[in-house]
Amino acid sequence: MRHGPPAALALGLLRLCLAQANFAPHFFDNGVDSTNGNMALFSLPEDTPVGSHVYTLNGTDPEGDPISYHINFDPSARNVFSVDPNFGNITLVEELDREREEEIEAIVSISDGLNLVAEKVVILVTDANDEAPRFIQEPYVVLVPEDTPPGSSIFKVHAVDKDTGSGGSVTYFLQNLRSSKFAVDRHSGVLRLRPGTALDYEKTRAHFVTVVAKDGGGQLRGADVVFSATATVTVNVQDIQDMVPVFVGTPYYGYVYEDTLPGSEVLTVAAMDGDRGRPNRILYSLVNGSEGAFEINETSGAISVVQNPAQLQREVYELHVQVTEVGTAGDPAAQARAPVIIRIMDLNNHPPTFYGESGPQNRFELSLHEHPPQGEILRGLKITVNDSDQGANAKFNLRLVGPRGIFRVVPQTVLNEAQVTIIVENSAAIDFEKFKVLTFKLLAIEVNTLEKFSSTADVVIQLQDTNDNVPKFTSHYYIARIPENAPGGSTVVAVTAVDPDTGPWGEVRYSIYGTGADLFLIHPSSGVIYTQPWASLDAEAITRYNFYAKAEDMAGRYSLAEVSITVLDVNDHSPQFGQNIQEKTMVLGTPVKIEATDQDAEEPNNLVDYSITHAEPADVFDIDVHTGEIRLKNFIHSLEALHNVTHTRDCTWSLEVQAKDRGSPSFSTTALLKIDITDTEMLSRDPVAAFLMQTKDNPMKAVGVLAGVMAVVVAMTVLISTATFWRNKKSNKVLPVRRVFRRRPGSTPRTVRIEWLKFRRAKAAAKFVLQEDPPNENCNNNRRGRSLPPRAPAPPPPPQAAAAAGAARRTVPTVSGSLAPQQPRRSPTSKALGSPVQSALISELKQKFEKKSADNKAYY
């Protein structure tokens, strides 16, 4: 809606009236140190963090209307602060930097909505130590003469720090003070040469000095900090003429060869001014030593030979070269000298050459016996070696090329010429059996020349054989076997020995010796060992013969080998039964054993198997094949059972037993065995019979038992006598020696005593008298009245050859022979004492005693 002029005028008047009635707001002025008010004289450190609350605008309105705060900056300036319109809180929004902006101008205003009051304020930015010192006018390079006196000032460095106060003050020092020749003033930065030191261009041309600038320190964000900066000062040393000339490439050696032309350059020496920064010109000259043979170019230093080398009188020349500096004014300055060695060299154009007695020679021959003495010189070789060159060109080495360690050559190093000597070094290696010919090459080769000229000569040594070897058997031990039935003259074994020598020294003769060599012979040339023509070997007597075989050459050198000959057993003996096989007594349940021995030496020839070849009846006895034990059949447990299976009632059986060896071919022997069978009940009733039964096969056992009983009785008597003696001695009683005679009451006459002794003797002898009693057909010991002895067994069939009358018969076992001796005749009128079993045992024991007596008589 638009108003006309009258209406607008009325509205403006109304507003004027209202304004005149409202007062403007204003700020509070709280002084310099206040943080609220109108920011008058307000200052702020430059290290205040951005976003910090730094001030609060504070004012009031007279009418109490709401007020708002504002802050404005010049358009060309930064907006450093922001303000909260309602509360007047001023916040730092940009980083402060005093070195760039020391004061900040701003306009702060307060308004009540109608009236606006603005004030211009200046905010001071206070300093913080946030700047480091900075050197100006870098880089620092200074040229200092090397003769500058110590302590002199040579340069001044300058550093600035934009901070104020202690943070803006700068001090100077060197980073490596100890290793430096320089010092710096702490406050002014003047660099000086330290006292006692000097510069030397020839040693060090430039020095690099590090200077440190440090501020005085100050606060930065609440902490004390110190900043520093470094700068390098390059001190170049200026050279001064203070050094003599210096030769380069010393020592100097030159060589003039025999084909060098006069005027040829030998070598060039070089020298320079010791002051290399500004060197002077150098001139060369020869002082002495040339003897007119050499000259030097004064500007280049080249030395030349002016005479023909063939005319030079010396092999080595020592020249002295002098160099002189020429100053800027042309006057001679410093001088220096250096030696130059020049050798006159021979050309190496001649190789070493070997000479014999007639001139140059490249083959030498010699005959030599094998194994010459150690260190012997081969005098048959006359060798000379020569090199026509001079000096080092004529020096060469000698050595032998071929089998090593056999010979040695002397000398090993030669200068110009020498006589060659070859010496034996290893006598054992010079062996005709290994080498018939020894071939070496004698080599001469130059030592110190580039060409290494050399020459060779063949050395051929023909070896001659000597008797240096002992015949050696192909084996140290020879083992042979021969059957014992081999005839005389049988070949046993051949021994072989080899002698490597040739001719008569290589012929070998064989012989044998030793305790076992009596039955053998050896062929002296072939080494075949054979038995004596009359020799008879027996493996049962000697199973092995040991002796030595000897191999000997013509000079008596020999070696030995052991020979062991084993005699192989042949089955040539038949088994032989023992003498106690004629008659055996068997107790029921206990076996009897027969034994035969075979005199053969080895198994299986001496192993014996046993068998029963004939028995009547055949089903009564069994025999163990290996042990020879004979026992009753398992079903026979008593005499009654035995009588039930036999046709006779007799208690004695005759068996034909056989002993057969296991050899090939096999031999056997048979014997007739009589077996008396008794029962254990009968032996238990008569202990004497039991003892005689046990000792029946070994009568000496009974004698031994009797001797033992007598020994026990004698020992007891001695013990009792000894005890009685010691008891009487301990009682200290002296007993009188006297004889006490007591009269027997009613003594019998002497004739009665004699008759009693006769009766005693007759009674004792009657024990061995056998009496023939009527036979008991049942043999079961059930007799009426007194016991009758059993009937004696029927004698075996007599042998075909009768023995002499009155002599004890000894049968020899054969395949069909019998070992049963002839039974002695018994007296029909003799009386039998004791039990029947005892009588039979006594009879058997008596027969064994008689047989042993007859054998002993036949032996003697």
Image (tube, grey):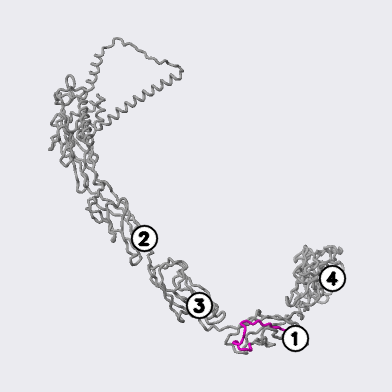
Q: Distance between the Cα atoms at labels 2 and 3?
A: 47 Å
772 relative to 799, above or below: above
Q: Position of residue 72 (x, y in %)?
A: 80, 71
Q: Position of residue 628 (x, y in %)?
A: 23, 38
For marks 4 and 3 on the same chain, the one whose residue lies earlier in the sequence: 4
Nearer to us in this view, 109 or 156: 156
Magenta stretch holds residue 18 = no
Name the quarter where the C terminus is drawn.
Answer: top left
* Pointer 2 residue: 557
Residue 445 image label: 3
Q: Distance between the Cα atoms at labels 2 and 4?
A: 144 Å
Left or right: where 483 falls relative to 382: left
Q: Distance between the Cα atoms at labels 4 and 3?
A: 114 Å
Using a 10 Å C-alpha cutoff, classify the residue at mark 3 as few (fewer than 14 neighbours), some (14 to 19) or many (20 or more). many
Left or right: where 98 falls relative to 838: right
Using a 10 Å C-alpha cutoff, classify the residue at mark 1 as few (fewer than 14 neighbours), some (14 to 19) or many (20 or more). some
Q: Distance between the Cα atoms at labels 1 and 2?
A: 97 Å
Q: Position of residue 835 (x, y in %)?
A: 21, 23
Tell me if I can see residue 161 in this picture.
no
Name the quarter where the N terminus is drawn.
Answer: bottom right
Nearer to us in this view, 353 or 199: 353
Instruction: Report the magenta residues as a range.
Output: 305-328
Amino acid, disc 2? Arg
